């Protein structure tokens, strides 16, 4: 796997382009030095934007929206815009006041945000920035491309409305106090409360702002950085992982599928011993049918499709069978449930190791690099099909591509070496990490192992119940 470009690499690329070097030659030099070669394309684009008269703020915002960290976006833009211009456009605080409407009633609030502020960052599906004067809230901006009439833009609000309704219905019939508390917590902290449209001169919606609560404490990524030299005791890490697993189990009751259950969407207040999951707005919502406490799921259909597949390109190493953009299928046929559990596995492993390990991160670099590249290879194959107007049955082609890569990996690496007690001790992790590491290795080659163990009636239990049992020292 290539290293992400740092500030010095960005400066070098800009200097080589300015000297007239061919982009392909620069890409080759980067690849030979184990730096991400595609960074050259971003620099070529930024230079073209400068030449066309595009302001630096627009270039920076586009980079952040595309998933570049704020610092990297600043580095890239600073190579093509004069220092005084960058300082004027990027460092001067320019706040915007937005009128937002409640999801629950017709009430409205005025919110002041600073889209160009230093606290702005890229979220799962848009810019996230602080709300001036209100530390208990964040605002996120989702670009709508292409621009849509108001009626069609409402689909971006359906996730929040349907999730609130599902969680509320589950809360009404739930009798267990602890699960009631989890449902109340999710309703109060994990979904947006208000929204606002941005429109163009033709009245089309070009972006949507969402206002969402900001729980106390820090997200887990912030904790990892702050506590790297002095991580929490093993039992505290186990408790945090168990709290996460129990909340993921609660989300299954109303049929929510959370593909973005990553460490940056989990806030922990260590002083209060409190964990809150945030930003569930983009969850998929499985269609439910009458016949059971929460409704039987007899058909593989969505009520609302997920708005995001998570951060599989930036944070989590995913297997070839992980869901793909453009492949239309249900929660089961598209491996969305298995995909959610894979991301949750990565999150648990990061918590237990306090970010010293991520999923498959213990394997040899050559093996890890090969396994980590397979998803992008499937993506390239599917992209070619989607670009072909005459292509049909993309779902079958996706299944075939996944199967091909899994066979190749199985022939090369099966069985993968077991994560042993010695491995656990070497990394300074709780003994239960071995279960999650070995489950991940098995699941890469066969996602069906993420189905959960059968209960007394022969039906599969929630895998998150197994997670909680292991974390409490039991056997699933």
Image: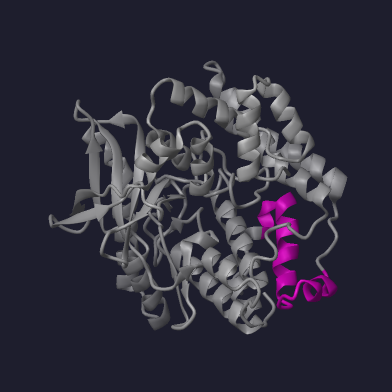
Which residue is at the front of the view, 174 or 283? 283
**x and y, in percent, of residue 59 in the image:** 43, 34
**x and y, in percent, of residue 162 in the image:** 31, 54
Question: Residue at horizontal 37%, vertical 63%?
Answer: 190
Question: Residue at horizontal 67%, vertical 83%?
Answer: 473
The magenta span reads 420-449
Which residue is at the front of the view, 31 or 416? 31
Question: Residue at horizontal 73%, vertical 23%?
Answer: 25
Tell me if residue 153 is in the magenta stretch: no
Vertically, is 98 above or below 295? above
Question: Residue at horizontal 59%, vertical 28%?
Answer: 41
The quarter of the picture where residue 163 lies is bottom left
Which residue is at the front of the view, 249 or 119? 119
Quadrant into which the C terminus falls: bottom right
Residue 102 appears in the figure: no
Quadrant into which the N terminus falls: top right
**x and y, in percent, of residue 288 in the image:** 40, 54
Q: Residue furthest front?
A: 84
Residue 387 appears in the figure: yes
Q: Is residue 367 left or right of residue 128?
A: right
Q: Is residue 241 left or right of residue 155?
A: right
Total marks shown come to 0
Vertically, is 211 above or below 271? above
Tell me if residue 448 is in the magenta stretch: yes
């Amino acid at each position: 796997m290539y290293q992400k470009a740092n500030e010095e690499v960005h400066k070098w690329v800009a200097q080589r382009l300015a000297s007239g070097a061919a982009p392909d030659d620069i890409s080759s030099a980067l690849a030979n030095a184990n730096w991400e070669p595609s960074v050259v394309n971003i620099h070529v684009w930024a230079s073209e934007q400068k030449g066309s008269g595009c302001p630096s703020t627009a270039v920076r915002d586009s980079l952040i929206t595309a998933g570049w960290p704020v610092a990297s976006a600043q580095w890239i833009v600073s190579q093509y815009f004069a220092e005084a211009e960058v300082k004027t456009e990027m460092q001067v605080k320019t706040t915007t006041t937005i009128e937002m409407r409640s999801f629950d009633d017709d009430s409205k609030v005025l919110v002041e945000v600073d889209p160009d502020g230093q606290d702005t960052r890229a979220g799962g599906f848009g810019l996230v920035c602080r709300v001036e004067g209100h530390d208990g809230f964040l605002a996120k901006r989702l670009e709508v491309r292409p621009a849509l009439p108001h009626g069609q833009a409402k689909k971006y609000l359906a996730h929040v409305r349907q999730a609130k309704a599902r969680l509320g219905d589950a809360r009404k019939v739930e009798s267990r106090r602890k699960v009631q508390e989890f449902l109340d917590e999710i309703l109060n902290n994990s979904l947006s409360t208000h929204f606002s449209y941005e429109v163009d001169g033709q009245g089309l919606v070009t972006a949507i702002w969402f206002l969402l609560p900001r729980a106390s404490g820090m997200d887990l990524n912030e904790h990892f950085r702050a506590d790297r030299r002095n991580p929490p005791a093993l039992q505290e890490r186990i408790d945090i992982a168990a709290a996460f697993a129990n909340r993921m189990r609660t989300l299954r009751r109303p049929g929510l599928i959370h593909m973005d259950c990553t460490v940056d969407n989990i806030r922990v207040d260590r002083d209060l011993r409190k964990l809150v999951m945030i930003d569930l707005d983009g969850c998929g919502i499985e269609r439910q049918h009458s016949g059971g406490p929460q409704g039987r799921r007899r058909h593989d259909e969505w009520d609302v499709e997920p708005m995001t597949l998570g951060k599989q390109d930036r944070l989590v190493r995913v297997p070839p069978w992980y869901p793909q953009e453009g492949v239309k299928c249900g929660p089961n046929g598209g491996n969305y449930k298995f995909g959610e559990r894979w991301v949750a596995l990565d999150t648990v492993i990061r918590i237990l190791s306090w970010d010293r390990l991520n999923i498959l991160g213990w394997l040899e670099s050559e093996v890890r690099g090969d396994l980590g590249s397979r998803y992008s290879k499937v993506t390239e194959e599917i992209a070619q099909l989607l670009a072909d107007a005459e292509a049909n049955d993309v779902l079958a082609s996706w299944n075939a591509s996944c199967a091909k890569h899994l066979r190749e990996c199985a022939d090369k690496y099966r069985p993968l070496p077991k994560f042993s007690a010695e491995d656990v001790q070497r990394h300074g992790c709780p003994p239960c990490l071995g279960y999650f590491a070995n489950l991940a290795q098995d699941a890469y080659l066969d996602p069906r192992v993420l189905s959960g163990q059968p209960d007394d009636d022969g039906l599969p239990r929630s895998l998150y119940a197994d997670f909680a049992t292991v974390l409490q020292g039991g056997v699933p």
